Image (cartoon, grey):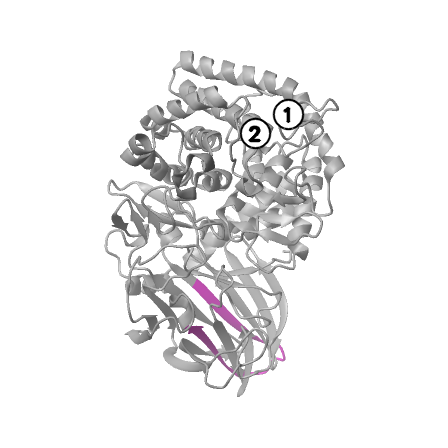
Amino acid sequence: MKLRPPAVPLITIDPYFSVWSPADKLTDATTEHWTGKPNTILGTATIDGTDYQFIGVNSKDLPKMKQIFLNVTALSTEYRFEAGGIELTVLFTTPLLPDDYYYFTRPISYLKVNCRSLDGKNHRVKVKIAVSEEICLDYRGYGEVETELIDQGDIKTAKIGNKVQKVLGRDGDDVRIDWGYFYLSVKGGKTGTEMIPIAFRDGIRHGSNLYMTFVTAEKEIECPEGDALFTFAYDDVESIIYFGDHLKSWWNKDGAVITDEIVKAFADYSEVKEKADIFSAKLYADAEAAGGNHYAEMLELAYRQVCAAHKLVLDEDGKILYISKECFSNGCAATVDVSYPSIPMFLLYNPELVAGMMRPICKYARSDEWEKALHYDFAPHDCGRYPFVNGQVYAGNRLEYQMPVEECGNMIIMAAAHAIASGSIQFAKDNLDLLEKWGNYLIKYGADPDNQLCTDDFAGHLAHNTNLSLKAISGLIGLSIIYKMLHDEHNSGKFIRIAKKFADDWVVRAANGDGSFRLAFDRPDTFSMKYNIVWDKLFGTDIMNKEVIRSEFASYRDHMYPYGLPLDNRQPYTKSDWYVWTGTLAETKEQFEEFIEPLWMAYNFMETRVPMTDWYWNATGSMRGFRHRSVQGGLFIKLLEYSGKMKVN
């Protein structure tokens, strides 16, 4: 990978179990949770009696091994180091295989360390990994931890957790888990616990009595060539509260025990690693064919982040729920306008996960609270604040802060795309009452939306939003497709005719007169990304005149900054998901590559060292807000188009 990641993924399981390196070199910064709070992991190699650091910043001021290589693929991160006459290869792998729920949800991540002699001599090498109490607390010192050493034959494990267990005890955004237990394991080595002085990223100890509890695992490695295998595992005990029910993840739905799973993980490492490598290689090759090598690199970096912003559980009927966390925004769970931009990735790799995103919304939309107490006839925005999925919390459910056209259009488009990608109309059929209600809302209000919020709510309310009108048009197209798949030609024809009428009217009222189209119908000489019409292209319905899209896309050149096209004329910032959706309107691969190059440059040079932000300033490439959000699944939309999976027969 030529792209320099803003932050490097190390462990990526779910919104709680997440560790990243915010530096180019693994020894230049303390490892972090995606929120930016320390999740300290230390890695040391003792080479012929001399200690060296290769992970994290050690309070003992050890010499650092020289990092000579870094590469990130969809499922692995590889570093190479040199010191003391040896080369050390350090490989982190989280096997998030989307078509295998067992591996996709098993909360275990691997670390493989290989040693190779560089000078042809034999060397005595010991590798040691230490993980701090921060992994199981909101922050260090938040509570008293307890530890346990577990012996399972050749597999040795050190366990750590908060002494006071309040499982699913709170919700929130910039918070970390403080229940459940973390397990550090090694094969053929030994484990232990230590009190280690805290090292801060500025290199200052701030006193000699600041210690944390660490669990440790170590192994002697034969060199000229040998290896050690470690695992990181986290058992959260329970994962989600779903309308009052406490739900477990898929991996332990039948009572699986984490220590047994750790033993299995060591046994199946070679098989799982091979599957991960095959998946990663195909993802890169397909993405490069679709949009070029820089596009492929962004997808490699995004994949694990998108998966790890979700939790997969089963409802009382055994159906999949795929719960997103709206990371570093407000922590909402199952947010529709976060799920919507993420779906291209899941439509490619497992469409059932899209249905899993929609089920909570459909359930809540039929609730007494939504229908009878609030009297809302449009789709909800969310279903709670992670990990509580008990009903919408956004803006206190006040009407003026809802996103009616946005969320109605999103849900219908998602249902149609799921039906096409999965080849099954059953989910849409089961929820046709809601989809039709939301479609009628779009007919009533979507041609020229009133003063509503859209998904870009940080920009504020906007009346007569032309892009929101395109959302309504795309939603009506989606509903027409659903009826067509249900062999209801009458309703299919009805909704496609209305969509066509709306589109023809849109072209007249949104025109600036120079081939470009406005931000709002009543604001001449303005512009905005028209990302919502991309589904017309993907579905192959061609409701919108192609010359309109061609001239609109050509007009974007006049508004470019060094790091890309702004979302609209109001502020010089952009959103990465909508940026790639807009780029997918390009007629050729070459045009697409040219358009998305500034996005690659923004990530490559971004000074804000966090997991891929989706909201940044176009002039400087610096983060405006948000991090680690699942919306980066939207970057896969060009690959989705290239696959041809969305074409309606």
Q: Earlier in the sequence, mark 2 or mark 1?
A: 2
**For the N terminus, which image quadrant?**
bottom right
The residue at 71%/37% (across/down) is 590
Above or below, 341 relative to 69? above
Q: Which mark is residue 463?
A: 2
Is 127 magenta? The answer is yes
Q: Quadrant of residue 138?
A: bottom left
**As displayed, is residue 620 above or below residue 401?**
below
In the rendered structure, the answer to whether residue 275 lies left or right of residue 596 reads left
Above or below, comparing residue 486 to residue 280 in the picture: above
Q: Extreme top residue here?
A: 490
- Locate residue 7, reporting x and y percent: 57, 60
As for residue 635 lying within the magenta part, the answer is no
Residue where numbered disc 1 is placed: 522
Q: Mark 2 and mark 1: span between their CA atoms?
A: 9 Å
Q: Position of residue 567 (x, y in %)?
A: 63, 39
Secondary structure under tag 1 reads: loop
Residue at 48% x, 37% y is 340
Front residue of 533 and 452: 452
Position of residue 619 in the picture relative to residue 49 (left or right)? right
Residue segment shown in magenta? 110-132
Image check: 641 left or right of 605? Answer: left
Q: Nearer the viewer, residue 268 or 385?
A: 385
Q: Residues within 10 Å of mark 2 (few under 14, many from 20)?
A: some
